[in-house]
Each structure stands twice: as structure tokens, then as C-alpha cells.
Image (spheres, rainbow, N blue to C red):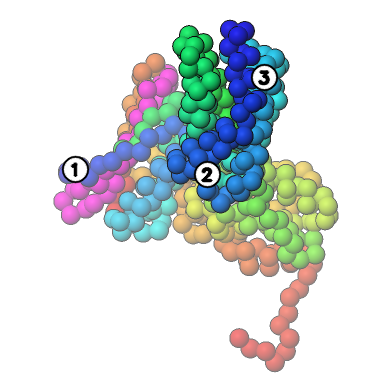
């Protein structure tokens, strides 16, 4: 796996979520993702970026082009130093929200991508990493 | 201090003409006076007014405490000047320069008048420096405020511009959404649409999201809320512009839009709306595609 191609987008405001989406869409287009693949990846990124802003108190997204043999894909890593999640399983379940959201962001994002990893420590922060292969 | 006060005031009074002339020269050498956005006359008037107000305030008030009521007219003047500078497209630096460029002419004049009394000259100069710095700060603050007001107003105008409710047919309203559907916009969209439903007695509203690039759970939630509100008004709602890739993504996200009628295109949605309200559209005989 080669991850030399990497850049970050800061995530502090709702406007940054829009920028994050645009950056992801552009990268997917460069890699020749189909419209469906693009839309799924961008939507997953939108969910995780917004969580970083609203639940994580801000952070950043890292974009990477990843390779596995001849396959190429994108890896997106969302990281914040916010309150973290006391119960990841609960947070990942459909329809659970600690606020007034739909509670479908984390679980929905997982269904939209090929790889999904989440780490979270209460009081320390959260990191979610996803990958989508072409 | 009381001596300084009256000295500056009387110098401002007896040398107003020269001061304005010198000030204009100074501003011109900084490259700002000949600006076509303010005519020379208007600039001249602003300078005279500034000097007049400075003189009045210096006569009646504390030279340093600009929050006093004696400075009220000056604060108001600076507000107006800053606002017009914002409207004319001047930068904040140029606005500050208007005031800072008065320093040199004033100091030169003070030296001319008080050259034989170094102590008074020093006191006067120091007081005048402080004073003009404060005036510039006041102008900056007003400039900033005016800028923020302009931005807020533009945002509001954009919100309104971006939500045109159009009549598609008798009893059918259409709302083409473009761009991102954040909370503020949803609120405006909802209000505008509900208002128009009341005004027109429309039975069906079509929200077209062809121009919304990403439908995530937040957008879905906003759409669901809007649909629910429309139903509470006794009207029906169709969401169009749900392209295949969006439909697939929504399914994977797991958002339940089963309750909502969705169509791929606005044309499909209009056909359905017409059908529901009892219209039939027929091609006149003899016509072919
Ligand atoms: N970055 C984060 N930091 C802290 N808590 C988070 C973070 N992301 C998600 N959560 C928690 O997980 C819950 C579920 O997230 P999500 O599925 O996106 O639903 P929603 O955002 O609608 O609440 C959130 O309500 C929040 O409590
Ligand atoms: Mg969320």
C-alpha cells in the first residue's frame, strides 16, 4: 500500500463540511470512480465530517490515495480531540443519536464504504477511517 | 490638561482652512485623496466636519475619554463616514488612513504655534496623538460593524434568492432547490413554501433536489421535516430530482423515505401531480414525436 498522496482538510465549521465534500468528490473523480461510487463516498464523508464538527468539537480529515496491487482507492481519516464515545456499539446502531439527529450517520457511512474502522476514547477523542476501492 | 484642551481647540478653530488644505495634500501623497469614489468636495466637507467636531469635543470634553457624551457627535460622524467607505468599497486601511493622515498637518501646526513652549508642545502633541489613534480605532470598529451588516444582509438576500417558489399548475407549486441544504436554508425554504401554500391554496408541492449534490442524513432529515409540515397544512408533497445514484445512496444510508413520494425528474413529478388532481394531458390528434 502506497500512501504518499496525502492532504488534510480542517473541520471546524459547517462550511468546512462543504469543502470536505468537494475535496472528496474531486479525488474520486480523479481516480475515475463511477457516479454511484463517487456519491456513496462523498455522502459517507459528509456524515463523518459533520460528526467531527458537531459531536467532536472540530478536527480534520485526511485524504489519501491507496493502492493494493492494481486496485486504487481513497482512504479518508477523520480525527478529533473531542469528548469521544462512551459506547461505540450504541453509537454505531441505527437510529441512535445523543442529539436530535437521525442517528444514521455512523451506521449509514459504514454501509456506504468497503472498509470502516472506528476508535474512540472518552475524554480523548475519536478517529474514524474509511476506504472505498474502485 | 485643561490648558492643553483649550490650546488644541483654539488652534483647530483659527487654522481650520490651512489644516484642511494640508490634510488633503497629505492624503493625496498617500494616494488616497484623488479617489473618484469620493468627490473632492465631499472629502473637503468631511475634513471640515471632522475638524469642527474635534474642536467642539476638545473644548467641552476630556481629550482622552472618548466614551463621554461630548464625543457623541464625533462617534456618529465616524460611523457615517465608515459606513459610506464600506459602501464605496474602500478597504479598512484606507478608512484608517483618512484619520491618520491628519496627524502630520496637525503636528506641524502645533509646532508652529507652540514652538517656543516645548513643554506645552509635548503635552499637546501627545494628547493629539492619543486622540487621533482613538478616532481611528472608532472608525475601524464602525467599519467592521458596517461590513458585518453588509455580509448578514447579503446572506439573507441569498437565502431568499435561492428559494423561488413557482406555480407549475393550478394547485401545484414547485420549489427548485440548488446547492447545500443546511439548517438555515431549510428553515427559510419551509417558511416560504408554507406561506405560498396558504396564499395560493395549493394542494401539491413539488420539491426538486436536482441541484442538491449530496443528500446525507441531515438533508434527509430536513426534507422529512418539510414534508411533515406540508402535510400538516393539508397539502401533499412530492420530492423530485432523486437521481439513481442518490436513490441508491439513500437506501444504503438506511434513511426511511418510504412515506415520501419521490420521482427521478421534475417532469415525472408534475405528471403525477396533475394525475392526482384530476387532470389529463393529451396530445392533440395528428401530432407525432
Ligand atoms: N466524532 C464524534 N465524537 C463524539 N461523539 C460522536 C462522534 N461521532 C458520532 N458520535 C456519537 O455517535 C452518535 C451517532 O452518530 P450518528 O450516527 O452520526 O448520528 P447523529 O449525528 O445524527 O447523532 C452521535 O449522536 C454522537 O453521540
Ligand atoms: Mg451524524
Residue B197 visible, this orientation: yes
Which residue is identified by label 1?
Answer: A4
Q: For the residue labelled by badge 2, is the local secondary structure a helix, a strand or a loop? A: loop
A4 within the magenta span = no
Q: Residue at x 39, y 39 (%)?
A: A110
Q: Residue at x 62, y 41 (%)?
A: B44
Q: Give the chain letter at badge 3.
A: B
Crowding at label 1, few (<14), some or many (≥20) Cα neighbours within 10 Å? Answer: few
Q: Quadrant of the N terminus of chain B?
A: top right
Q: Give the chain letter at badge 1.
A: A
Q: Residue at x 70, y 14 (%)?
A: B60
Q: Is residue B149 left or right of residue B69?
A: left
Which residue is identified by label 2?
Answer: B33
How much space separates mark 1 and mark 3, taking CA atoms?
65 Å
How much space separates mark 3 and mark 2, taking CA atoms?
26 Å
> Which stretch is magenta?
A63-91
Q: From the top left corner, tell me how far across and down residue B201 is, in percent.
A: 83, 55
Q: Quadrant of the C terminus of chain B?
A: bottom right
Task: Give the mark toward the camera: 2 or 1.
Answer: 2
Disc assigned to residue B57: 3
B237 relative to B275, above or below: above
Q: For the residue labelled by badge 3, is the local secondary structure a helix, a strand or a loop? A: helix
B144 relative to B177, above or below: above
Q: From the top left corner, tell me how far across and down residue A39 is, in percent.
A: 42, 52
Amino acid at each position: 500500500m502506497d500512501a504518499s498522496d496525502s492532504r488534510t482538510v480542517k473541520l471546524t465549521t459547517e462550511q468546512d463540511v462543504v469543502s470536505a465534500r468537494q475535496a472528496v468528490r474531486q479525488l474520486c473523480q480523479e481516480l475515475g470512480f463511477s457516479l454511484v461510487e463517487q456519491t456513496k463516498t462523498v455522502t459517507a464523508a459528509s456524515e463523518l465530517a459533520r460528526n467531527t464538527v458537531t459531536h467532536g468539537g472540530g478536527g480534520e480529515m485526511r485524504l489519501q490515495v491507496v493502492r493494493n496491487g492494481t486496485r486504487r482507492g481513497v482512504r479518508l481519516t477523520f480525527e478529533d480531540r473531542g469528548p469521544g464515545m462512551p459506547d461505540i456499539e450504541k453509537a454505531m446502531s441505527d437510529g441512535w443519536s445523543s442529539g436530535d439527529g437521525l442517528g444514521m450517520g455512523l451506521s449509514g457511512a459504514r454501509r456506504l464504504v468497503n472498509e470502516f474502522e472506528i476508535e474512540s476514547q472518552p475524554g480523548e477523542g475519536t478517529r474514524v477511517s474509511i476506504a472505498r476501492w474502485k | 490638561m485643561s490648558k492643553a484642551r483649550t490650546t488644541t481647540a483654539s488652534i483647530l478653530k483659527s487654522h481650520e482652512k490651512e489644516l484642511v488644505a494640508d490634510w488633503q495634500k497629505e492624503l493625496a501623497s498617500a494616494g488616497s485623496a484623488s479617489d473618484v469614489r469620493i468627490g473632492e468636495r465631499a472629502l473637503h466637507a468631511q475634513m471640515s466636519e471632522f475638524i469642527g467636531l474635534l474642536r467642539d469635543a476638545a473644548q467641552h470634553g476630556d481629550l482622552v475619554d472618548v466614551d463621554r457624551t461630548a464625543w457623541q457627535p464625533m462617534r456618529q460622524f465616524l460611523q457615517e463616514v465608515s459606513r459610506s467607505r464600506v459602501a464605496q468599497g474602500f478597504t479598512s486601511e484606507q478608512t484608517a488612513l483618512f484619520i491618520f493622515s491628519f496627524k502630520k498637518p496637525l503636528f506641524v501646526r502645533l509646532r508652529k504655534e507652540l514652538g517656543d513652549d516645548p513643554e506645552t508642545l509635548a503635552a499637546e502633541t501627545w494628547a493629539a496623538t492619543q486622540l487621533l489613534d482613538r478616532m481611528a480605532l472608532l472608525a475601524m470598529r464602525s467599519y467592521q460593524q458596517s461590513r458585518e451588516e453588509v455580509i448578514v444582509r447579503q446572506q439573507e438576500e441569498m437565502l431568499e434568492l435561492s428559494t423561488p417558489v413557482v406555480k407549475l399548475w393550478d394547485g401545484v407549486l414547485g420549489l427548485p432547490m440548488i446547492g447545500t441544504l443546511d439548517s438555515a436554508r431549510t428553515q427559510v425554504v419551509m417558511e416560504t413554501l408554507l406561506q405560498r401554500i396558504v396564499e395560493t391554496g395549493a394542494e401539491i408541492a413539488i420539491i426538486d433536489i436536482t441541484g442538491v449534490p449530496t443528500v446525507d442524513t441531515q438533508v434527509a432529515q430536513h426534507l422529512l421535516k418539510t414534508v411533515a409540515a406540508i402535510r400538516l397544512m393539508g397539502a401533499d408533497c412530492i420530492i423530485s430530482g432523486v437521481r439513481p445514484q442518490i436513490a441508491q445512496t439513500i437506501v444504503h444510508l438506511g434513511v426511511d423515505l418510504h412515506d415520501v413520494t419521490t420521482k427521478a425528474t421534475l417532469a415525472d413529478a408534475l405528471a403525477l401531480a396533475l394525475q392526482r388532481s384530476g387532470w389529463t394531458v393529451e396530445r392533440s390528434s395528428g401530432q407525432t414525436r
